Amino acid sequence: YYQELVLARLYRQDFDLPYLSRQDSRMIPNTFEAYVLRSQIPNFDFIAGHVTKMKTRGSRDFVSMAEAAGAESSKERGLTVMGAIYKPRKGVSIGVIDHYSWDVMNILYSEAEYTHELTDEVGLKLSGPFTHQRSIGEELLGGPSFDTYVWGGRAALSRRGAILTAAFSSTSDDDEIRSPYGSYPGYVSLMRSDFNRAGELAWLVGASYHFKEIGIPGLSAFANFARGTSARDGTSGESLPNRQDIEATIDYHLPGGRLEGLWLRLRYAYLDEDGDSEPAHDLRLILNYQIPVL
């Protein structure tokens, strides 16, 4: 019974949590040394554990969580994580998770989601996140103390493999949002920019489509446009340039045969900032193949 109720994961592993994740968009993923308990019962999921070390993507060595966040190598501290998701009824979920990086920072993340079928073919999903970050304890990052937050919302409308999305986020004037242990989980976060600078107001519109609806299984694509304004430097208070980011992605998962598990991804991003700076272009071709072992 207890084996079905509680699952333990020990030592080296990966995570798919807010602010603690693989972040494998361009190279090998983040990997962690951790000791975690997970529990899944009807309408309720729970996780609790302690992460001692991290190997960032592209690195060969594991370092303490404090060093991964930017502290001196001699300051070895871990990160304690605890969170839960409650699903009171179909289509509704509420989640809260806390990442306590000892003597470095505390990151609290919460999110609520609501989904509803408007018709047999049309679905609506509404969601809203909130993040609060602050320095704690010895504040080993070395800079000034910080206390900041970001909140936002997203609406997505789906029909027959097509999804239209609109989202926004608003970051506190006090400081930018940090994400040293993985990808930033904000709704307005693209390949070239996370749009989470101090004081930044950002919005996004996007669309995706799965071509299986027209007889091409395994092929899908999405595109997003985002713009951020009113950002400033969290230390000096100086205004920062407005920016806009465009990204497009095409994915193809081989649907079957000898090479089942092969995933080909083509991505392009264009980032432009107001002022004299040159636009940035980013083109990525990624090949993933999950090799069956057993």
Image: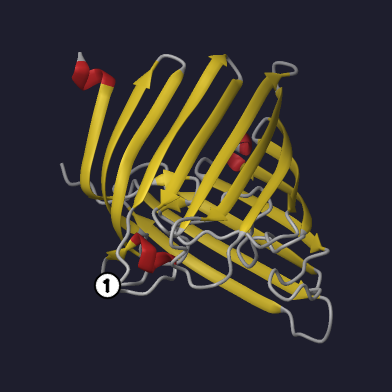
Residue 263: x, y in percent? 42, 53
Residue 200: x, y in percent? 76, 60
State which quadrant residue 279 falls in. bottom right
Nearer to the camera, 195 or 66: 66
Residue 31: x, y in percent? 31, 57
- Quadrant containing the C terminus in the rendered view: top left
In the displayed structure image, the side of residue 203 where residue 88 appears, left or right: left
Which residue bears the numbered disc 1?
60
Nearer to the camera, 3 or 283: 3
In the displayed structure image, the side of residue 183 where residue 16 appears, left or right: left
Is residue 215 positioned above or below 137 on the image?
above
Residue 57 appears in view: no
Is residue 151 positioned above or below 84 on the image?
below
What count of labels does the image hold?
1
In the displayed structure image, the side of residue 181 where residue 212 appears, left or right: right
Residue 251: x, y in percent? 53, 53
Q: Residue furthest front?
A: 138
In the displayed structure image, the side of residue 230 where residue 100 appears, left or right: left
Q: Residue furthest left?
A: 294
Colouring scheme applied when the structure was drawn: secondary structure
Is residue 282 positioned above or below 30 on the image?
below
Q: Residues within 10 Å of mark 1 (few under 14, many from 20)?
A: few
Nearer to the camera, 263 or 4: 4
Q: Secondary structure at mark 1?
A: loop
Residue 294 appears in view: yes
Q: Which residue is at a point 68% across and 73% down the rendered structure image?
A: 235
- Quadrant containing the N terminus in the rendered view: top left
State which quadrant residue 158 falls in. top right
Badge 1 amino acid: Arg
